């Protein structure tokens, strides 16, 4: 069962207009009775008689007035009920207490509200994050939103009181281990972790065009004067991998999560296997942009307060692949491609498990 009932689940009571109908019926009956008596007396030569056809017309007019009055009352009442429900839903949805009570009562998620979304750049993460963010607000959970990346501080520099008030994280490109160091929730075992992958070649091409058109990006002066093939010669493998590797295990650390693809060399297979284990053991939802519908279904299966709805249209742009040296691309994406394929396998397994659970 979902925490957030659909609009169709509201049983809006139809207002009873019996009082209006009763008054109109009695008025009509009185008119008919009076008309009938006058017609009778008129037929006996009193001079006050009303033709029978007039009495019938008066009856029809009375019935029409009855229907009109009932329809007006019904329309006004429905509008009033709809307005009250809309106001109540907006008001109650803004309170965390209401959301928590709703979750406990309908979703069985007491103590499991917190969610961490590891956002790999240029992988469609913004659209998935907005999907999560919208559903969280509906049940009263509070996401952390870093609106301006040049002015708003990154997560690990945010005031402690702000972090403690946060239930949902995902608007910053944080490494999993960096997020853990500043995650304020008591038990990480009750935190749901989500991520979304994209094929490394498409993601790299998209990142190149993104930086090339955005003059504010700090890598713009480098990218604008070089072709994709030239940039590729200086790219090291493991861009997606770096978000799931402990920085303490990497020579030189991980310093460039918000930058372009230039990182200290090098990640190795030890890092890859550790990252695979992390994905398998700690992430409830491992999604793939190329299979976004399956990703959405698994997300709604594993996170019951996520509302069923289409994911927004800000999904990552598909660029045509420019010319490049295949060997250079292999060197730049070999570990990431294997990591991506592993993530895809996890998605397919989760999708099968969720399908079996709903049977």
Image: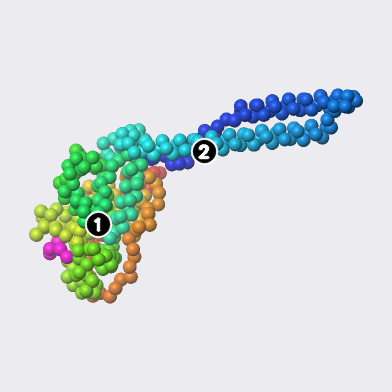
The secondary structure type at the circle numbered 2 is helix
Which comes sooner in the sequence, label 1 or label 2? 2
Q: CA distance from mark 1 to mark 2?
A: 45 Å
Q: Residues within 10 Å of mark 1 (few under 14, many from 20)?
A: many
Q: Which residue is mark 1?
A: 120
**Closer to viewer: mark 1 or mark 2:** 2
- Which SS type dominates the magenta stretch? loop
Residue 240 location in percent, x, y?
22, 59
Does the magenta segment cover residue 261? yes
Q: Mark 2 and mark 1 in contact (Cβ < 8 Å)?
A: no
In this rendering, is residue 15 above or below 172? Answer: above
Circle on res. 305: none
**What is the magenta range?**
260-267
Picture residue at 34% right of the left edge, 50% below the top: 131
Picture residue at 19% right of the left edge, 61% below the top: 259
Q: Residues within 10 Å of mark 2 (few under 14, many from 20)?
A: few
The secondary structure type at the circle numbered 1 is loop
Where's the N terminus, which quadrant? Answer: top left
Residue nearest the observer in this picture, 217 or 136: 217
Direction from residue 64 to residue 189 in the image, left or right: left
Where's the C terminus, which quadrant? Answer: top left
Residue nearest the observer in this picture, 227 or 248: 227
Picture residue at 31% right of the left edge, 58% below the top: 124
Residue 296 location in percent, x, y?
35, 51
Q: Residue furthest front?
A: 47
Q: Which residue is mark 2?
A: 79
In this rendering, is residue 39 above or below 134? Answer: above
Q: Quadrant of residue 268?
A: bottom left
Q: Is residue 180 visible?
A: no
Residue nearest the observer in this picture, 162 or 320: 162
């Amino acid at each position: 069962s979902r925490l957030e009932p659909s609009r169709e689940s509201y049983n809006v009571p139809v207002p009873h207009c019996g009082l209006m109908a009763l008054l109109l019926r009695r008025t009509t009956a009185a008119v008919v009775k009076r008309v009938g008596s006058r017609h009778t007396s008129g037929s006996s030569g009193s001079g006050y008689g009303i033709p029978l056809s007039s009495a019938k017309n008066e009856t029809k007019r009375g019935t029409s007035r009855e229907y009109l009055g009932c329809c007006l009352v019904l329309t006004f009442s429905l509008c009033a009920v709809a307005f009250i429900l809309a106001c109540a839903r907006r008001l109650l949805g803004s309170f965390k207490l209401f959301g928590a009570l709703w979750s406990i009562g309908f979703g069985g998620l007491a103590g499991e509200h917190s969610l961490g979304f590891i956002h790999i750049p240029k992988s469609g993460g913004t659209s998935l994050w907005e999907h999560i963010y919208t559903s969280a607000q509906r049940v009263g959970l509070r996401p952390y939103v870093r609106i301006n990346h040049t002015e708003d501080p990154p997560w690990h520099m945010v005031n402690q009181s702000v972090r403690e008030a946060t239930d949902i994280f995902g608007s910053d490109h944080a490494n999993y281990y960096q997020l853990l160091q500043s995650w304020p929730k008591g038990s990480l075992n009750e935190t749901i972790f989500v991520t979304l992958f994209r094929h490394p070649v498409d993601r790299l091409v998209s990142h190149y065009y993104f930086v090339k058109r955005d003059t504010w990006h700090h890598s713009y002066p480098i990218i604008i004067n070089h072709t994709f093939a030239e940039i590729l010669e200086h790219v090291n493998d493991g861009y997606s991998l770096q978000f799931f590797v402990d920085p303490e295990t990497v020579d030189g650390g991980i310093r460039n999560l918000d930058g372009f693809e230039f990182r200290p060399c090098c990640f190795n297979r030890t890092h890859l296997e550790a990252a695979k284990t992390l994905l398998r053991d700690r992430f409830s939802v491992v999604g793939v942009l190329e299979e976004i519908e399956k990703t959405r279904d698994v997300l709604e299966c594993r996170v019951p307060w996520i509302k069923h709805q289409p994911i927004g249209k800000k999904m990552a742009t598909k660029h045509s692949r420019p010319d490049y040296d295949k060997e250079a691309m292999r060197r730049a994406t070999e570990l990431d491609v294997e990591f991506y394929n592993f993530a895809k396998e996890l998605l397919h397994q989760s999708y099968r498990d969720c399908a079996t659970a709903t049977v």
